[in-house]
Each structure stands twice: as structure tokens, then as C-alpha cells.
Image (tube, helix red, strand yellow):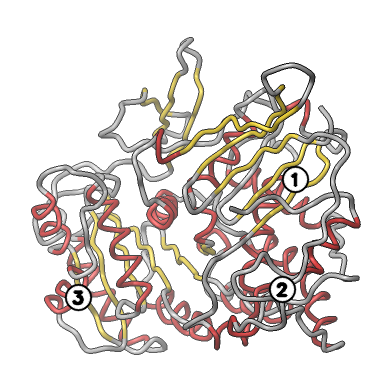
Amino acid sequence: MAGTGLRFRQGAIFFSGAHAAAHPRTRTPHHHCSPQRTHDARGRCRLTAKSANGRPQISASFRDVAIDGAQSEDGAPEQGGSTVSITVVGASGDLAKKKIFPALFALYYEDCLPEHFTVFGYARSKMSDEELRNMISLTLTCRIDQRENCSDKMEQFLKRCFYQSGQYNSEEGFSELDRKLKEKEAGKVPNRLFYLSIPPNIFVDVVRSASRTASSQDGWTRFIVEKPFGRDSESSGELTRNLKKYLAEEQIFRIDHYLGKELVENLSVLRFSNLVFEPLWSRNYIRNVQLIFSEDFGTEGRGGYFDNYGIIRDIMQNHLLQILALFAMETPVSLDAEDIRNEKVKVLRAEIRVQFRRVPGNLYGRRSRSVGGGGTTATRELEKATNELVLRVQPDEAIYLKINSKVPGLGMRLDSSDLNLLYSERYPPRSRRLRALLLDAIEGERRLFIRSDELDAAWAIFTPVLADLEANKVAPELYPYGSRGPVGAHYLAANHNVRWGDIS
């Protein structure tokens, strides 16, 4: 095989790898299938799916098993056992209203939440329980499928939603939240998840107040933290140190929404479950790997944010670097979250050189204004025919392999054809990004969350680049809005005898 090209694009991930004996955990809602249920030596629930030949394919360990007993309509459990309380801090914000509460409802609608659960909103705004429910109801939909009883499910979910107002640095506010949580937990073993849907400059205030007055004394307490995780190595390290004054590392779930995308998670399956790729997964057969993040809209409404953070901090240091780590890591000794994250850290700590010479600056025109005229794209025809494996993450999820075949007729003329899996044609549409990560946090599955040493290693790569850009006042290479990007990027690829993949 001559020069295999592997591409990831905005919407595309590509991954393949080694031993097919290992398979990543796949969660299947229990109303869709009934995998065999067993227990390990510690009594934890394990789900095992089998292939057509009867051999185990997937083994999953869920730390938090299904909860026994009944629950009343107002969310209070009726008998012993344990319960899960989910508190959305910053409940009146756009992220909570548009993403978090709808994701929680989707999990409830799919019967993926524990039987005993309660949802609380916490914010500075004065609001009653009923006002919170009215606000949430405006964004809840049943677009998941065409099942019946949607309105009944919605009503049942809203009855489990409550509100507590308070300042983010107020121990009194979180103490009152603790009192209300205990009322709903009704003597059961309490497990508590806090989703910090707030600006990063108040993360530590909330964690300090909540950990001191609203932590579970008998169950687990976890905090989901949204990016950005600092601006550079120094600020990121300071944030981590401050969080760890009040929390253990295993309590902190640093969320990257991009890792919850279906095809990002499918990357591991493609690599470990398809032996056809294993012997080719090396530098001997892979000419280049491209991560293409292209958008057809500008920075409208986000201009202030991008002026402050820029695309390197917003996209490259986290989303794309995480995918690179998944692509390049060695096969983990197991699919335990810590083993996977250990291998990712090894990749990030290896000698990754960010070539700065002749690289266009931030690769976008400020506030999306078209600057300068068009130009001819510099490309170089490759003498060897190539194969490309592409994972398109969004839009229109797809996996396809470009192969070379003979054009029918006389003579020997080659053409490129696609072997493809189009998700829209093969699977029903599902939006799973945030709800999958929420369910992972509830179950204690950390595989798709970022550990502190991963974060340190990622910033160690890009902090020198950012410092160099700022110290030398490197101006971004501007390009016309709606074009394929700066001409310099195509020259850069041509210098290495490759060309950018088609992003259509």
C-alpha cells in the first residue's frame, strides 16, 4: 500500500490500532437490548455483550449499579438504598438551559438515569421550584424518537427538579442546598454530582463552598468542570492546585464536549476491533495524519471570546490534541480509564515539536472580515496513489476508506472510490454528546474526561508557541471569509509532499 493518508476533519476522526482482543466499553440502553449481566469479584455490576460466535466482545464495569426500591413522584425515595442528586450550578445560564437540562431529560427519557435521582438548580437569581420547571420546560423536547408518553415523561422529570438560590461563594447558600438535598434523599446513601456551568474565575469559590457544606458524607461527590482550564501552563496549574485544596483528583471531571461525539468515541472501536488496520498502523505505511477543523460560519457573537483566547487555546490545545493522543497512543494494558489516560499522557509527554517556521498565525481573519483578494492554491500532485481513511465527525457523520480501482474499459487507468459507512443511512439520528458524558460522570467512568497530568502535558506543548506568537507579535495570515484558508497553509503541506484533504 503506497502512502496511506489518514484524515480527521471537523467532523472527522480517524483511529485504528493494535490488539483486537481489547474492546472499549459500549453502553447500550437497557431497553434496546439485554446483554448478559454478571458481577465481578468486588460485586460490581458488569455487562457483557457477545459476538455472533458466542465469544465475549465487550466487558463493562459500572461502579454505580442500579438502585433498588421505589421513589415518589416528588423525587423522594421511599426506602433504603442509595440515590443520585445532580446539582447544576449556574442553572439560569444559557448552557444549562439549552444543553444540560435537556441532556438530563434525554437520559431520563431513555431510562438511563438511576431510579432514585433528583435534579437541583443553583444560581444567584431568585426563583421558585415552579419557575425553574417552567424555564426548563421551554427547552425540553422529545425529538429522540417517536415514542409515546413524551408529555408524561416530561411531567415526571420536572417533578424531580428543584431550585436553590445563593451566591457562588456563599457557604450559607450551599448549606441550605444541603438541607434540601437531604430531604429528597430521605435517609438513603447520598451520591452527589455538581455540574459547574459557570465562568472559570469562580470555580474555586463554588468548589470551596460546596465541598465544605454540601458534600456527601457516606456516598461519592463529584464535580464536572467546563473548559477553558486556564490560558497557559501557569494559570492552568494554579487552577488545578486550588481545586485540589478541596477535592481529590478522582472527584474532578474536566469535560471536553468534543470527546462525547459519537465518532470520537468510535475511534477506539475502529482501532481495536478491526484487524485489517493493525499491521498498517505504523509510520511505515502512514504518510501523514490530518486533523481538519473547518467551519462555514464566522466568529459572530464570539468575537470577544476569540480576541481573548484565540483558536489555539479554544480548539487546538484541547479538542484536536486529545484526538491526536487517541490516535498515537500505544495499546493500553486494559480499557480501564486510568490505563487509557496513562497512554495518552505518554504521547503528550513525548517529543512533540510544534513547527513554527512558515506556519500561518491564527489561521483566521479577525471577526471574519474578508481581507485581501483570492489566490491560487499551491498544491503538488503526488506521484503515488494514496489511500485515505476518513472519519467525519460533523456534520453528516461518516467513516469512509478511499481505495484505488481500475476504471472499466481498455487500458489500465486508476480511479479513487469510497467504501463508506454513512451514519444517517445506517443508524437513526441521535444527539448523544453531552448526555453520554453526563452518564459517564454519574457512573464514575473517567475515560473521556481529562486528568490533571494530561492537562499539564497539553499546555506544556502549546504554551511556548503562544509565548512566541505574543513576544514576536506574529500577525495572523488573513484569508477571504468562506475560502479554504490561508494560502500559506497549502504551501506548508506542499513542502512535505502532501496536500490538504478535501473538506467538502
> Is 247 or 447 nearer to us in this picture?
447
Q: Using the numbered discs, state the Cα–Cα distance from disc 3 to disc 2 in whole angstroms.
A: 47 Å
Question: Residue pushed farthest top?
Answer: 53
Q: Residue at x 49, y 85 (%)?
A: 202
Which residue is labeled 2 in the image?
374
Dot 2, how many residues are within 10 Å of its Cα: few (below 14), some (14-19), or many (20+)?
A: few
Cβ atoms at labels 2 and 1 below 8 Å apart: no
Above/below status of 436 relative to 196: above
How far across and down, in percent of the image, does residue 333 sit? 69, 34
Q: Residue at x 82, y 75 (%)?
A: 465
With 336 as the anchor, is 464 left or right in this view? right
With 162 as the anchor, is 439 left or right in this view? right
Viewer-side label of 3, 2: 2
Secondary structure beneath label 1: helix
Quadrant location of the N terminus in the rendered image: top right
Above/below status of 35 relative to 214: above
Cβ atoms at labels 3 and 2 below 8 Å apart: no
Above/below status of 131 relative to 395: below
Q: Residue at x 22, y 63 (%)?
A: 140
Question: Looking at numbered disc 1 in the image, what kind of residue is underneath it?
Answer: Ala
With 24 as the anchor, is 276 left or right in this view? right
How far across and down, in percent of the image, does residue 63 sit? 43, 43
Secondary structure beneath label 3: helix
How far across and down, in percent of the image, does residue 392 sit? 56, 47
Question: Looking at numbered disc 3 in the image, what kind of residue is underneath it?
Answer: Met
- The numbered mark at residue 135 is 3
Dot 1, how many residues are within 10 Å of its Cα: few (below 14), some (14-19), or many (20+)?
A: some
Which comes before the other along the chain, label 1 or label 3? 3
Q: Using the numbered discs, state the Cα–Cα distance from disc 1 to disc 3 in whole angstroms.
A: 44 Å
How far across and down, in percent of the image, does residue 259 sit? 54, 54
Which residue is labeled 1 in the image?
328
